[in-house]
Image (tube, grey):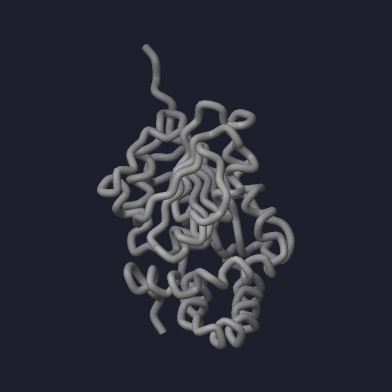
């Protein structure tokens, strides 16, 4: 079965939106790992005066992670799935958090413009048809010195990590199929197996102009499966 893309994928997420939070809460460390990746942006304490883009916010778990680390930042959260975004926007947020319905490819059309001090993208890039295009767009929306943190299922390349991922997905499929979301979770499995390894994705950042690129592991069962990959737009040189 091929991975889902664009409108078909957004529709699948729409259908899964109501049960999504309950499923991810059953994943040990899910929210703590997002907070850890948000801290890895390395931004100034509390985020005062900073603009941050949460790219692919889903039901708002990544937004909440950013807010816990940067409570004074202005956070713009976007997602291509109207259903997921409705779940996110329906939660209680301070005035500095806003939501917009748009894909990562159509930010400018939706009125989402830089410059941003940072971009946070959780579980986004393997769901896109052209990761390099989006990385180039993100780089253009960041200030000089602006930072990107990608929190993503990017396998290490070792067989045991691939096997563990497949075993976890196989265990989830009966439950998600019963909920009517089997196609989405089969996509989840395949999208990870077929996507970049962590090393390969880090090279994408470097090739699109980010420097100080680092691959940072996450603890627990997701070691070797989920990584934070961070990079920075080069500072402008002064003469």
Q: Residue at x 38, y 60 (%)?
A: 80
* Residue 143 falls in image quadrant: top left
Q: Residue at x 74, y 61 (%)?
A: 220
Can residue 118 be seen?
Answer: no
Give the total number of marks visible in the rendering.
Answer: 0
* Residue 210 falls in image quadrant: top left
Q: Quadrant of the N terminus?
A: bottom left
Can residue 73 be seen?
Answer: yes
* Residue 160 image offset from top left, x and y in percent: 66, 73
- Comparing 218 with 93, the one in front is 93
- Comparing 152 with 198, the one in front is 152
Instruction: Describe residue 234's horizontal placement relative to residue 224 as left or right.
Output: left
* Residue 24 falls in image quadrant: bottom right
- Comparing 127 with 82, the one in front is 82
Q: Residue at x 34, y 64 (%)?
A: 129
Instruction: Describe residue 223's horizontal placement relative to residue 80 as left or right.
Output: right
* Residue 107 image offset from top left, x and y in percent: 32, 48
Up/down of 18 relative to 48, above or below: below
* Residue 26 image offset from top left, x and y in percent: 69, 69
Up/down of 125 relative to 184, above or below: above
Q: Quadrant of the C terminus?
A: top left
Instruction: Describe residue 74's horizontal placement relative to residue 142 as left or right.
Output: right
């Amino acid at each position: 079965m091929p991975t889902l893309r664009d409108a078909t994928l957004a529709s699948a997420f729409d259908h899964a939106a109501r049960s999504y939070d309950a499923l991810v809460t059953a994943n040990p460390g899910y929210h703590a790992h997002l907070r850890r990746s948000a801290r890895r942006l390395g931004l100034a304490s509390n985020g005062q005066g900073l603009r941050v883009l949460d790219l692919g916010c889903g039901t708002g778990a990544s937004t909440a992670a950013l807010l816990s680390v940067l409570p004074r930042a202005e956070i713009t959260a976007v997602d291509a799935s109207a259903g997921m975004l409705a779940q996110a926007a329906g939660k209680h947020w301070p005035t500095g958090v806003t939501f917009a319905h748009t894909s990562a490819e159509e930010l400018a059309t939706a009125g989402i413009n830089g410059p941003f001090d940072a971009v946070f993208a959780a579980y986004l890039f393997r769901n896109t048809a052209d990761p390099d295009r989006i990385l180039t767009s993100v780089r253009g929306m960041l200030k000089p010195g602006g930072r990107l943190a990608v929190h993503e299922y990017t396998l290490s390349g070792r067989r045991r990590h691939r096997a563990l991922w497949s075993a976890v997905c196989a265990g989830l499929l009966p439950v998600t199929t019963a909920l009517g979301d089997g196609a989405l979770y089969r996509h989840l499995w395949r999208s990870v197996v077929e996507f970049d390894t962590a090393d390969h994705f880090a090279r994408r950042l470097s090739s699109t102009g980010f420097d100080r690129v680092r691959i940072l592991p996450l603890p627990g069962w997701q070691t070797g499966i989920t990584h934070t990959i961070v990079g920075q737009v080069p500072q402008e040189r002064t003469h």
